[in-house]
Amino acid sequence: MGLVELAADLKAKKKQGITGNSLKGKNIALIFEKPSTRTRCSFTIGCIDEGGHPEYLGQDDIQLGHKESIKDTARVLGRMFDGIEFRGFKHSSVEALAQYSGVPVWNGLTDDYHPTQILADLLTMKEQFGQLKGLKFVYAGDGRNNMANSLMIGMTKMGIDFVILAPKSLWPKEELVSLCEGYAKESGCSVTVTDDVNKVEGADVIYTDVWCSMGEEDKAAERVAILKPYQVNEEMLKKTGKDRTIVMHCLPAVKGNEITEDVFEKYADVIFDEAENRMHTIKAVMVATLGE
Ligand code: CP
Ligand code: NVA
């Protein structure tokens, strides 16, 4: 069973009041250098639902990267915990934890990637459309942030036509686009990076994310200036030429920037399903990689 199917199964069981035991006796470290609502709560509840014990380790709680190298912290935590989630800045930190801890390490977001979010997005799309292959997915906004990067990987692996609408200065790295072109070729879809907003035509999903990611707050004025034409609003929705298009957002949202309040509220049911699905999919990741 794939992760999305496993998550759907765990979700259905949870709705019937059935939780599992597959993480019984497992201790899971949750390292957060950056704040989080959804990811933190999803790992915590997903772990407890399956009988495990989560331990939150915030920025000021441990020495990670300040007084102790990540390599040493990884070797300590790996002797005490059965799995480690990491949310933080440098992608190299999560790689180092994985390299030196000897236990499963899950990326809860770095400056470059946000892979667990993509699983929730895929589950939500499956619920909305019944199938994934052949859909057209358009991401509008900061085309080189962690969400754009991970969405491009996830969608092209699943055979979903993927488009980034962004100004040229915010396009993703060429190497990543080439990698995803390879995935697209294998799965039978396409990947397009463009600054032409009209390419939203035919979109089944329009997706957006904040214009300034965590740690980039000083860029607010310049981002608003260049990203305004890429705001998800009624005008953009009309350009799809479809009446079954859905709008998604990983949250948290800055309404009035990347998405208008009215469009956000129109698609609130989908967006909050997506938020709930973080928990079911993160639970699935832990169960699949650590569960008994
Ligand atoms: N979407 C997401 O990762 O939300 P949090 O930052 O609240 O975890
Ligand atoms: N790009 C956003 C995603 C938040 C879930 C950030 O990194 O802040």
Image (cartoon, helix red, strand yellow):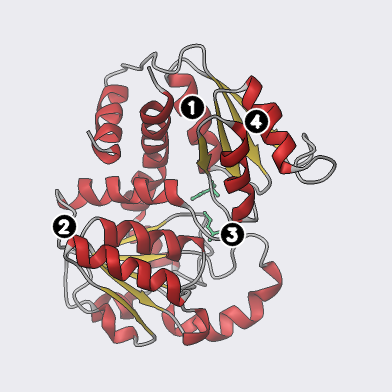
- Does dot 1 land on a helix, a strand or a loop? helix
- For the residue carrying disc 1, how many other residues have a C-alpha within 10 Å: few (<14), some (14-19), or many (20+)? some
Task: Identify whether 107 is placed above or below 12.
Answer: below
Alpha-carbon distance for marks 3 and 2?
Answer: 28 Å
Compared across the picture, whether 11 is left or right of 130 comes to right
Residue denoted by label 3: 111
Q: Decide which of tag 1 and tag 2 comes sooner along the chain.
A: 1
The type of residue carrying mark 4 is: Tyr
Which sits in the foreground, 168 or 274?
A: 168
Mark 1 or 2, closer to the camera: 2
The answer as to whether callout 3 falls within 8 Å of ligand 2 is yes
Q: Decide which of tag 4 and tag 2 comes sooner along the chain.
A: 4
Q: Decide which of tag 1 and tag 3 comes sooner along the chain.
A: 1
Alpha-carbon distance for marks 1 and 2?
Answer: 31 Å
Residue denoted by label 4: 56
Residue denoted by label 1: 45
Alpha-carbon distance for marks 1 and 3?
Answer: 25 Å
The type of residue carrying mark 3 is: Asp
Which sits in the foreground, 43 or 93?
A: 93
Residue contact at pointers 4 and 1, CB within 8 angstroms: no
Which disc number belongs to residue 133? 2
Q: Decide which of tag 4 and tag 1 comes sooner along the chain.
A: 1
